[in-house]
Amino acid sequence: MILHAPGEALRLEDVPVPEPGLGQVRLRVLACGVCRTDLHVVDGELPRPKLPLIPGHQIVGVAEDGRRLGVPWLGWTCGECRYCVSGRENLCERARFTGYDLDGGYGEYALADERFCFPLPDGYADAQAAPLLCAGLIGYRSLRMAGDAERLGLYGFGAAAHIVAQIARHEGRRLFGFVRRGDRAAEEFARELGCEWAGPSDEPAPEELDAAIVFAPVGELVPAALRATARGGVVVCAGIHMSDIPSFPYELLWHERSLRSVANLTRHDGEEFLALAPRVPVHSHVEEFRLEDANEALDRLRRGEIRGAAVLRIEP
Ligand SMILES: [Zn+2]
Ligand SMILES: [Zn+2]
């Protein structure tokens, strides 16, 4: 499924099976998660994607030697810049991203730099493993950035929050879920996943939060989340794109509250998270689509209709 220009639907096309270059592995794709970032790429909200592009950066595939591997968003880094050499390869200025700078997993075959692939835990079926690779991984990094907050607010209850909630409960934190006003199904889903309270994001929380993670790409939620946090609290913005943040009084940041974003992932995050997920154990709720129905999956995600994560299943 190929993107020719932002704003257009993906097109189902036959292309040659890609030939691996030095250090690359060729995977037959079994499943590929559909991420909100894919939506930002397709809708033209992120600048300069490779074009034409095969999107998708939560790839579960099988290598020619039979190994089942996962391919995440971080597809390549330079290894020599000040970020790479200080354990912050997620910030590499020359990084290349899967399904953005590099062709991704909305297809039958994908190439990946073997150094950036992860072996996947055995207990997960292909479709269930796919959302671990971005929703899970970036969610996990966001949770680490929230520190040891006991009372945690999650804004936007999609693929990432549904995995983070399970880890946070496993760690003994108390959870509060904020969803779009009127989205009863999302409120109920948040409660099922361990939120002791779930309600509309424009309503005050029942008590102060120690941290909040904003997954929804909605700038208005940032001052709302700051307002909901206690002194010393942290607000983490977990998405790659967000609408403008409205101005807000300094009072909301005062008393050592902090506001930060989370960008991409390191391979270290991946190793830690994929070891942790089966121990929790994280169960991913997925809605499966055929490869040729990728546009429908993206539309449903855009309308907030996916419960958990959307995943494309690729039949051989
Ligand atoms: Zn670098
Ligand atoms: Zn993603």
Image: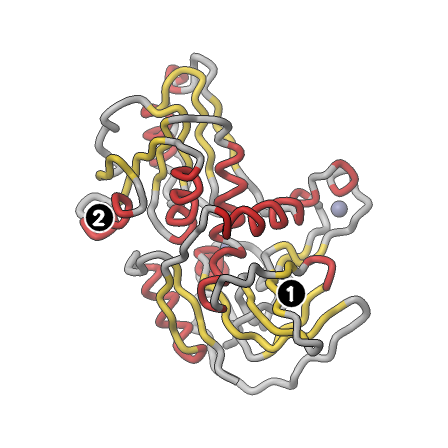
Alpha-carbon distance for marks 1 and 2?
38 Å
Furthest-top residue in view? 255
Residue at 64% across, 65% down: 102
Residue 288 on image: x %, y %? 38, 70
Residue at 31% across, 58% down: 307
Does 54 sit left or right of 248 as displayed? right
Q: Secondary structure at mark 2?
A: helix
Q: Amino acid at mark 2?
A: Glu
Q: Nearer the viewer, residue 301 or 280?
A: 280
- Vertical order, 114 against 152 (above or below): below
Neighbours of disc 2 within 10 Å: few (<14), some (14-19), many (20+): some
Residue 35 on image: x %, y %? 46, 58
Looking at the picture, the colour scheme in use is secondary structure
Ligand 2 within 8 Å of disc 2? The answer is no
Residue 279 on image: x %, y %? 50, 48
Does 152 sit left or right of 107 as displayed? left
- Vertical order, 196 against 126 (above or below): above
Neighbours of disc 1 within 10 Å: few (<14), some (14-19), many (20+): many
- Vertical order, 252 against 73 (above or below): above
Q: Secondary structure at mark 1?
A: loop
Q: Which residue is mark 1?
A: 102
- Vertical order, 46 against 156 (above or below): below
Residue at 50% across, 52% down: 278
Q: Amino acid at mark 1?
A: Leu
Residue at 38% across, 15% down: 251
Q: Quadrant of residue 99?
A: bottom right
Q: Which mark is residue 188?
A: 2
Q: Quadrant of residue 141?
A: top right
Residue 295 on image: x %, y %? 39, 72
Q: Nearer the viewer, residue 118 or 292?
A: 118
